[in-house]
Amino acid sequence: MDPAATATAIMEHSATETTDFDTVVHLYWPRVFRFALASLRDRDAAEALTQDCFLHAYKAWERFRGEASIQTWLMRIAVNLVRDASRNRRLQFWKRLRDVDADGVGVHTRDLRLTPEAEALLREQVAGIWKATAHLPERQKSVFLLRFADEMTLLEIAAATGLSENAVKVHLYRALRAVRAHMEKVTGRSE
Amino acid sequence: MNSHLSSDQICRWLAGERGTEEHRHLRDCPACQAELDQFQHTLTGFRISLEQSPVPAASYARKRQALPRWILATGALALIVAAPAYWNARQQRAAEQARADELLLERVNASLSRSVPASMEPLMQLISKESQ
């Protein structure tokens, strides 16, 4: 069974059935790690948070009844852990942007077959998004990352964050407005 | 809607607030559609940049087996507190053993210095009295 089909099968089953937790780890570890990395900007902290997330999930695995999909459930745990970690890291401002910064995001354009000018512009704009998200309030950042890094639907984000769908839209709109304003400032032009 | 979509309207659209007017405008206005596509293209670039970031191997099992820090800290504290007491007790035991050894040695010496074995001493005393 390919990973996508396995993921679908797992989402359709509740945890009380014979779902293998190791398969869940294998499937969702990268997603949780990337969300943590984009949220915390620190590779070590992101790895520790991902471990914590799956540890929490493992402990609660018996109680998981499948009301939400496994992805939504895991992301809810991750969002809470990121919120706690961000509170703890407020005083550790020197750690921010230590691992992940705009310089580390340039490689992504190699498969897009762009002209050199278009590639340079895209790289600059992507770097602008990275920088802009670093300054977003916690909730806006989580909603933005769940939507545009994890490609979750508004309903899934609502379930993962405990917000209403309308509140998700409001936070997402504010985040997009801030990101766009930052990009316009950085590139000196409107999108 | 005659003018182009504002930056705010594009953000609202992407956030899921999609009105009929905006929908119609985007369908009829290639410039606004292109601007929306460009922004979405950049957001896709952001997602891909994150996906290309290396991911460490899953290791929750290692953490699951690790002892909690408070247990390690308590153990270390107990060791620090107990070490001097253990050392004193050990030295005291050594001193007692040395005293016992000394006493035993004295007894052995006394035994060796006797002219007759201890069990024969009463008989020797009797002989000595009779001879006097």
Image (cartoon, rainbow, N blue to C red):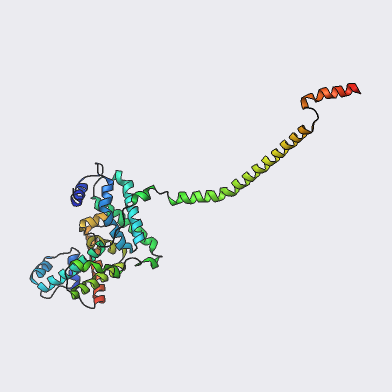
Query: Looking at this rendering, what residue extends furthest in the top direction?
Result: B130
Query: Looking at this rendering, what residue extends furthest in the left direction?
Result: B28
Q: Nearer the viewer, residue B67 or A152?
A: B67
Q: Is residue B40 left or right of residue B80?
A: left
Q: Nearer the viewer, residue A36 or B129?
A: B129
Q: Is residue A85 visible?
A: yes
Residue name at image x 26 percent, y 76 percent: A186
Q: Which of A119 and B113 is in front in this view?
A: B113
Residue name at image x 21 percent, y 71 percent: A122
Q: Where is residue B70 in the image (x, y as percent from the top left)?
A: 46, 51
Q: Is residue B112 left or right of residue B53?
A: right
Q: Position of residue A80 (x, y in %)?
A: 32, 56
- Please tell me in which quadrant of the rendered image residue A78 appears: bottom left
Q: Nearer the viewer, residue A189 or B90?
A: B90
Q: Where is residue B82 in the image (x, y as percent from the top left)?
A: 57, 47
Q: In this view, does B105 lie to the left or right of A59?
A: right
How many badges with numbers are in the image? 0
Where, quadrant-wise, is the C terminus of chain A in this rendering?
bottom left
Q: Is residue B12 visible?
A: no
Q: Position of residue A68 (x, y in %)?
A: 23, 50
Residue name at image x 32 percent, y 47 percent: A58
Query: Looking at this rendering, what residue extends furthest in the right direction?
Result: B132
